[in-house]
Image (cartoon, rainbow, N blue to C red):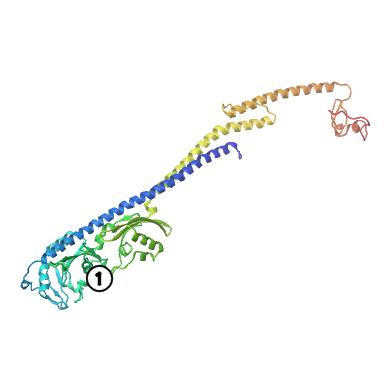
Amino acid sequence: MKNSFVKKTIITILIISIIPFAIFTAILIKTVQSFEEERIEDSLNMIIVEKVETMKKDLQKVENEVSNLAQWAQAAGEYKVDTAQISKAYKRNEKDVLEAPGKETSSYLPGNIALDQEIAEEIMQTEAIVPAMRNMVQNNKELAYVYVVTDRGFMRVYPYLDNSIFAPNHDQRNDPFYLIAKEDSNREGAKWTKTYYDYGGNGWIITCSKPYYKKDGNIGGVVCADVILSELVQSIVEFRIGDSGFAFVIDKDGGVIYHPDMQDIKGKMGDIFQTKYAENYQESSARQNILGEMKQKNSGLISFDEEGKQKAIVFQRLDTIDWIIGIEIDKEEYSVGKEYLTIGVWTSILSLLLLMIFLGSLLSKRISTPILQLTEDVQKMGEGNLIPLSVNTEDEVGMLAKAFNSMSQQISEYTGELIYSKNQLESVFNSIDDTMLILDRNYQIKKINKVITGNIQKEPCYKALRKQEQPCKNKKPWRG
């Protein structure tokens, strides 16, 4: 039936059942999303702390090695040497640069600096620290070169480096690695340069420098270690989350130390890596704001939208060198819990709907069948067929059927009495010898006890019986 009460009842039950579940589901999703945000932040913070600690450990190891080498150089600077014993291998080449070809280390003295006794002493004294330089390079794969530059302008490098890469009058004391160490008047420790392109062909590097001093307190020179950037940030380079998550390193000014989208940039020897973080994103205002927040805070998590995707960056400052290490992720890729939650919710909704359909079918069969039977029997009753209703359930429908059966029985008995009374009246009416009529208000004959020819029931009695056109005067038909 189109407007079945049972169907309406079942639909109402389904709606009443689903609405609380939908509300509960919405609350659950919101709660889990909040929990997922906290989980993402905690997880990323754990990862970033691990990366920062790993890099801090690697940097600290290099700083310790450089500090130890500075102590070796300072001690060697106090050695008494006989400059007459200086090796004859040291001589000027065709560019007037003093060098000693064929040795384990390379030496360099610009053509515009004369070889005097003090420089000769420095040449012989720095030979004493070659074993320490060798051990540093061999024990640290991230190191490209270790070298010492004296305050008189002489440089010794391990391993051997062809001096032809330098200009004949190139003074190493004017290079950043020497200047930042020399500026350390408080002797706070090792210093780090910005990223620059290696003279020795190892790509982008950074240099750790530390000065050593003479007995009189004046600077004796600077020891340096060139760190290959790709080796130092290896754990950052290899780090991936999903298809698009990556790690990056920038300095305090926003200059890029490492970024996967900028690593193929080449440079000339000695060039400082000038690329800024925001430049890779067409100076995006959102990226500018992110950079500003990273520069102001020591750590944090930044959520933002970019190209229709929800992303997040977690960052922490590396105080050893004043770098910022960050991890950028696509939240949709990282938030697998949300995907599982969505699947679980839809599975639950589908299961609930199937359960409701099944229960609805049972209810329909249990409730609608007796109601439909009752409806059919009542319709027959309305047509005059006063048969007992065939519903035998013990519920409200059964009670209603019993009430209808009782009413039907009473109606049947009353109808029988009426028929009996009617038959008696007709018998008396027909037994009267005189003509007796029953008229309606318009004098139409409704019943007559005599057989009279003609179609008298279609005409008024005064016309059918008396052939008059008007009712009898002063005579009115009886009206009951």
Q: Nearer the viewer, residue 276 or 151?
A: 151
User: Could you tell me which residue is drawn at 48 percent across and 43 percent down?
Assistant: 23
Image quadrant in which you'd find residue 325: bottom left
Residue found 61% across the figure and 28% down from its top: 400
In the image: residue 465, left or right of residue 263: right
Q: Is residue 388 visible?
A: no
Residues 44 and 118: in front is 118
Q: Is residue 422 above or below residue 27?
A: above
Residue 351, percent from left and from top = 46, 41
Q: In this picture, is 10 found above or below 58?
A: above
Where residue 191 appears, x then y in whole percent?
23, 64
Query: What residue appears at the point 29 percent right and 61 percent down from the top-left corner?
Result: 323
Residue 396 in view: yes
- Quadrant assignment for the C terminus: top right
Category of crowding for the residue at label 1, using alpha-carbon neighbours closer than 10 angstroms: few (below 14), some (14–19), many (at least 20):
some
Amino acid type of the residue that numbered disc 1 sits on in the rendered structure: Gly
Residue 399 percent across, percent down from the top left:
60, 27
Q: Quadrant of residue 301?
A: bottom left
What residue is shown with label 1? 270
Which residue is painted at 48% across and 38% down in the image? 355
As drawn, is 10 to the left or to the right of 303? right
Q: Quadrant of residue 181?
A: bottom left
Could you tell me residue 273's position as x and y percent? 29, 68
Q: Which quadrant is home to the N terminus?
A: top right
Question: How many marks overall?
Answer: 1
Q: Secondary structure at mark 1?
A: loop
From the viewer's perspective, tell me whether residue 64 is left or right of residue 244.
left
